[in-house]
């Protein structure tokens, strides 16, 4: 059916590549491209004998002209961007120049300031419309599946949605004193930024990790959850009509937070350059180089993740509650594709979004977040491709 250029060669990319190869009728040919071509070759070698034809290429995704050249030589129908969020715009520019559809899993992030905003990518809407191509933003899990969950609830169970709590729990243990489950730079920027949530048309800002609750998760048990800002709040506040409150919560162990506070106190999480022995270094990038590569954690991570949405609203004039979530087992993900569940839960939805676009089911000119499309085919594909979801119509609510 089509060809996909997959940019990036980390843990999420590894999942996307495996899942595309499990779906060869849709993904007949793929090209894995990264600055480090050895990582691309290693992925290709693990999939020897796949019906999907696999190519590799060396690519600096910051260089739009280089991305254009690769697109022109490989001629993909779609670009799946699982590189760094700093590179979203250079890749979108290349897709515009070549008339190719675009999918990513995280919003554009300017390197110098943690923003987590869609404004830069939403500004491309008119240009993608005129070019007759689709940009599908945030087709990971959160953002991604969480938006599809909300759209599904809105379509099937509610006349009005009043509040959404997105809850993300990782009960996995990798055995290291301190490590991050995805890109350390992005992860730590996200956690050390101010919290923010949407209430009655306004954004309320909080100090980092200052709001804490305990939630008893299905299959995982009680965990400390902390209020963070996460980019899907911005798009859901626009696309889920009439919603009065949206919050995002994530679990962190005391051990993780103690390490993070010490690192923050000594300046190691800073993104401001410092002079060191005649050269400038960014402390957070140096810390990233010191920490275990998230793609190396798969073999040693044990336990489960649980990510979902607790939704409250009205149906037929009566109050209604709904909780939809996925539980993923780290060991099972590693056994299947060689990556842990954090990468798996992001990579599977990236493949599904690309598949729905290639099939024409989610294809229309412009720039869209996942909740703007019909959720049903995506929800069906989650069950088919490894992220089955569960429902609860009387969940414990967060006050």
Image (cartoon, rainbow, N blue to C red):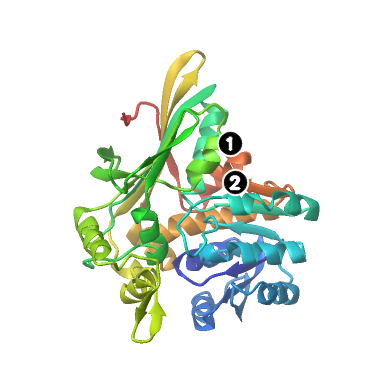
Image coordinates of residue 236 in percent, x first then y, are: 53, 38
Considering only vertical position in the picture, is 370 above or below 90? Answer: above
The spot of residue 281 in percent (x, y) is 39, 77
Label 1: element kind: helix
| 123 on left or right of 216 | right
The numbered dot on residue 284 is none
Number of numbered discs on residues: 2
197 above or below 209? Answer: above
* Quadrant of the rendering where the C terminus is positioned: top left
Write down the quadrant of residue 65 in the picture: bottom right
Q: Where residue 241 sits in the image (x, y, percent)?
A: 57, 29
Question: Label 1: few (<14), some or many (≥20) within 10 Å?
Answer: some
Quadrant in which residue 398 is drawn: top left
Are the residues flagged by discs 1 and 2 in contact, CB closer than 8 Å?
yes
Q: Which mark is residue 239?
A: 1
Q: Image point 39% across, 55% down: which residue?
A: 190
* Residue behind mark 2: 369
Q: Is residue 24 visible?
A: no
Residue 306 visible from this viewpoint: yes
Judge by depth and name the residue closer to the eye, 318 or 66: 66
Q: Earlier in the sequence, mark 1 or mark 2?
A: 1
Q: Residue at x 78, y 53 (%)?
A: 132
Residue under the point 69% across and 46% down: 361
The reply, left or right, for residue 72 in relation to residue 147 is right
């Amino acid at each position: 059916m089509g060809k996909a250029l997959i940019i990036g060669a980390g843990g999420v990319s590894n999942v996307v590549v495996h899942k595309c190869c499990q779906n060869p009728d849709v993904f007949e040919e793929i090209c894995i491209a990264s600055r480090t071509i050895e990582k691309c070759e290693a992925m290709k070698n693990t999939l020897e004998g796949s019906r999907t034809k696999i190519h590799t290429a060396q690519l600096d995704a910051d260089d739009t002209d280089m991305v254009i050249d690769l697109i022109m030589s490989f001629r993909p129908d779609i670009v799946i961007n699982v590189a760094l969020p700093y590179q979203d715009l250079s890749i979108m520019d290349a897709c515009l120049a070549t008339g190719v559809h675009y999918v990513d899993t995280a919003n554009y992030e300017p390197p110098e300031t943690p923003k987590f905003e869609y404004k830069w990518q939403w500004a491309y809407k008119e240009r993608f419309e005129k070019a007759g191509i689709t940009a599908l933003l945030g087709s990971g899990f959160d953002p991604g599946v969480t938006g599809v969950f909300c759209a599904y609830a809105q379509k099937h169970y509610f006349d009005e949605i009043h509040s959404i709590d997105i809850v993300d729990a990782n009960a996995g243990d990798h055995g290291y004193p301190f490590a991050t489950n995805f890109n350390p730079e992005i992860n730590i920027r996200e956690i050390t930024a101010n919290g923010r949530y949407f209430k009655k048309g306004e954004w309320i800002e909080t100090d980092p990790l200052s709001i804490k609750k305990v939630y008893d998760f299905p299959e995982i048990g009680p965990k400390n959850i902390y209020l963070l800002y996460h980019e899907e709040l911005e798009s859901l506040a626009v696309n889920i009509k009439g919603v009065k409150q949206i919050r995002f919560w994530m679990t962190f162990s005391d051990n993780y937070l103690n390490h993070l506070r010490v690192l923050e106190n000594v300046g190691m999480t800073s993104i401001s350059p410092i002079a060191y022995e005649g050269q400038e270094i960014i402390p957070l990038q140096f810390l990233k180089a010191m920490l275990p590569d998230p793609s190396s954690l798969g073999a040693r991570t044990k336990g489960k993740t649980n990510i979902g949405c607790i939704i409250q609203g009205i149906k037929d004039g009566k109050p209604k509650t709904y909780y939809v979530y996925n539980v993923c087992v780290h060991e099972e993900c590693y056994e299947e594709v060689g990556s842990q569940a954090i990468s798996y839960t992001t990579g599977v939805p990236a493949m599904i979004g690309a598949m729905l676009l290639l099939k024409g089911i989610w294809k229309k000119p412009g720039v869209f977040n996942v909740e703007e499309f019909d959720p049903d085919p995506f929800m069906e594909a989650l069950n088919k491709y490894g992220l089955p979801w569960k429902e609860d119509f009387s969940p414990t609510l967060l006050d």
